[in-house]
Image (cartoon, rainbow, N blue to C red):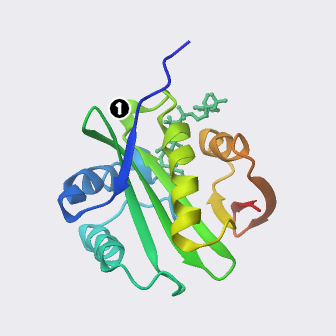
Amino acid sequence: MLRRPQLDLRPFHQADTEFFTRMASDERVTRYVGDGQSWSHEFINGRIRTALEQDPIKTVGASRWFLATEENAPVGIVVSTRKVDGIEIGYWVSPDRWGRGIAGVMVDKALATVSEIYGTRKLIARVDPANAASAKVLTRRGFQLEATCEGLDYYTLA
Ligand SMILES: CC(C)(COP(=O)(O)OP(=O)(O)OC[C@H]1O[C@@H](n2cnc3c(N)ncnc32)[C@H](O)[C@@H]1OP(=O)(O)O)[C@@H](O)C(=O)NCCC(=O)NCCS
């Protein structure tokens, strides 16, 4: 059996922009994110700006991002955003590291941090039904499939 990855999770910084941009420019990553289209540089930069703005945590739309590192090398990110119905999480692992359990460990670490920062345990996630690995990350951690809306499965952790 593979060794469980040893990861550190810390807030996303401006200096992590290059790593994020590399992932956001990779069609293997964006395939199941948002509308599945490739991300333009303008769109990527806009997302990074919003993440670094650090709107007040109670504001709908406020987001906080986290970088996961393994032996000091970036391997993935977790994004979190306050929505009306809960805190939405998303997670990306660098494709050269897929299949090693990194997403699971990264999300385990993020769940406690995100709940604490936003002051709520109501977490939500939207997943393309074809994204089996992502669905497994969620259901393994107690998320439940509530509904399918606009082509995406809607999961909650109460
Ligand atoms: C989805 C994603 C985060 C998974 O990352 P990963 O580090 O490869 O995932 P893990 O190795 O932790 O695997 C998660 C689970 O899915 C399973 N899995 C992996 N690939 C799978 C596949 N193709 N089909 C079914 N299950 C799969 C693993 O066995 C594991 O299950 P387990 O906990 O029972 O062992 C990664 O593929 C990714 O970044 N994709 C692009 C961005 C994305 O889609 N993000 C999610 C949208 S919110």
Q: Nearer the viewer, residue 40 or 140?
A: 140
Q: Residue at x 66, y 64 (%)?
A: 124
Residue 11 in which image quadrant: bottom left
Q: Secondary structure at mark 1?
A: helix
Q: Is residue 48 above or below residue 111?
A: below
Relative horizontal placement of residue 11, taking residue 15 as reference (left or right): right
Q: Along the horizontal axis of the image, is 139 left or right of 14?
A: right
In the picture, which quadrant includes the C terminus? bottom right
Q: Residue at x 39, y 31 (%)?
A: 97
Q: Residue furthest right?
A: 146
Asked whether 121 or 155 is in front, the reply is 121
- Whole-percent x, y for residue 45 in the image: 26, 71
x, y percent for residue 29: 42, 48
Q: On screen, 17 above or below 109?
A: below
Judged left or right of residue 147, residue 23 is left
In this rendering, the count of numbered labels is 1
Q: Is mark 1 within 8 Å of ligand 1?
A: no
For badge 1, the amino acid type reads: Asp
In the picture as drawn, the residue positioned furthest to the top comes out as 1
The residue at which mark 1 appears reads as 96
Which residue appears at 53% of the width and 62% of the height?
114
* Residue 139, image quadrant: top right
Residue 156 lies, in percent from the top left, at 73, 61
The quarter of the rendering in which ligand 1 is drawn is top right
Neighbourhood count class around disc 1 (C-alpha, 10 Å): few under 14, some 14–19, many 20 upward? few
Residue 30 locus on image (x, y percent): 43, 54
Q: Quadrant of the N terminus?
A: top right
